[in-house]
Image (cartoon, rainbow, N blue to C red):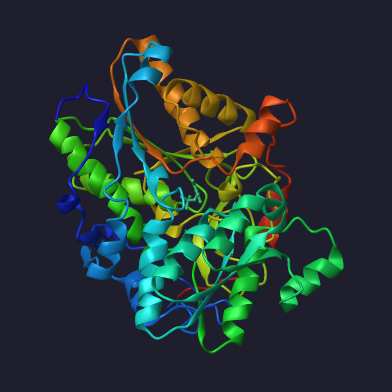
Amino acid sequence: MDKNQTKFILDEKDLATAWYNIQADLPEPLPPLLHPGTKEPTQLPPPLFCDEINKQEFSKERWIDIPEEVQSVYRLWRPTTLFRAHKLEKALDTPAKIYYKFEDSSPAGSHKPNTAVPQAYYNNKAGIKRITTETGAGQWGSAMAMACQYFGIELKVYMVRVSYQQKPYRRNLMEVWGAKCVPSPSPDTQIGQKMLAEDPNHPGSLGIAISEACEDAFAHDDTRYALGSVLNHVILHQTVIGLETKKLMEKIGDYPDIVIACVGGGSNAGGMMMPFVQDKIKGKKKDLRLICVEPTGSPSITKGLLAFDYGDVAGMAPIAFMYTLGHDFVPAPIHAGGLRYHGMSPLISHLVKLGYLEATAVPQLATFEAGIKFARTEGYISAPETDHAIKVTIDEALKCREEGKSKTIVLAHSGHGHFDMGAYDAYLSGKLEDFEYPEEKIKEAQKKLPQVNLK
Ligand SMILES: *Cc1c(COP(=O)(O)O)cnc(C)c1O
């Protein structure tokens, strides 16, 4: 393939047949997950997740086969296209080569179906009839709704209330795919009732929505819970992104100097970066930079604590060692709903700690400015989450211009913004503001961490 092409496309027969599991190659193993009650090392609580998913969460096998039934769904939109951003490069007058891996082309419009499909598949195989989950911006809920359709599973989605109001069309999408979606906090669970009693207009948070979905799954024998990010099995499924990117880079005869992705729970970044982290661990490309981008309004890595904390508000999900702003942190209502989680994937946290990944935070207004620059050059309208990665991509490309250096930059283009036009409208009419994390809150968060004594 010629570097100067615009689109780089793999053949359907080049679809990955196995996911890459970074746990096989970690120089130091991950800290354990802890049971929220006993605070002892635990598996994923079995009434929440089916066996196969539990097994994958802790597996140290380097390659895990992608079942044919999952591949047959992947083939509807995978392998996805890698683009060379010629028009953006020209507008920036940069010697950098910018590529973007385009996850927008899945039916739900983001990378999330890459894990939604195997999660629905494994639950169906285990005889599960119903799944509960939470969603922030609605990307995950709609991906899961689509995936459950393929395998005849009923789905109930608890959607963070502020997003439920900001993004009504995402709810419609879930309903078209046959799911039930309620705003969270909802009157359907005890934790939801408690939150609504405190504040009838509670904006909700991912931490609360996760508690509601877990409570619902615990209460019904035929029901399991699905999580769209954060956990190891989710990142495992997302590695199809990085595997395809590496294969394409090989065919082009190029290799990235910098890989950039936004991080909410860390799944698109993890999926893109893990196959490259493998190269770094093996010493193949020591100076490769892998940059995770978060919002200044919810900066778990750049401002948070690296500690054991609960994954949800009510303390029903396992305790994980991760970067966290505190499990009861309610982030500012930024439009990148997918980036409003208080914690971070334990895998991403671990790799930041070991120095393989770096992180930076960017304010909301600058991300929309970057997204609009991208739309006015490349044409594609990106999700507000993706705009965070675009902002840093543009910054790095401009640095190349200043330094007169040509670097190869790969951007994980996690999704489209077609259901986020309200957010673009708010930006264009000057109604958006920037949010900084209130730093005094970190002391409160520290006090509320679970007390853990590991031998
Ligand atoms: C959910 C979402 C994100 C953030 O989630 P990660 O698990 O960190 O990838 C980013 N981009 C898009 C388009 C999303 O839907």
Whether 253 is drawn above or below 76: the answer is: above
Task: Tell me if I can see residue 341 in this picture.
Answer: no
Nearest to the observer: residue 347 or residue 254:
254
Q: Quadrant of the N terminus?
A: top left
Q: Is residue 106 left or right of residue 309?
A: left
Task: Tell me if I can see residue 197 in this picture.
Answer: yes
Q: Dividing the picture into quarters, in which one does residue 27 lie?
A: bottom left
Picture residue at 33% right of the left edge, 46% below the top = 272
In the rendered image, residue 123, in percent from the top left (x then y), is placed at: 40, 78
In the rendered image, residue 104, in percent from the top left (x then y), is placed at: 42, 43
- Outermost residue on the front side: it is 176
Q: Dividing the picture into quarters, in which one does residue 446 lie?
A: bottom right
Whether 278 is drawn above or below 399: the answer is: below
Q: Is residue 158 left or right of residue 225?
A: right
In the rendered image, residue 41, in percent from the top left (x then y), is placed at: 45, 77
Whether 191 is drawn above or below 325: the answer is: below
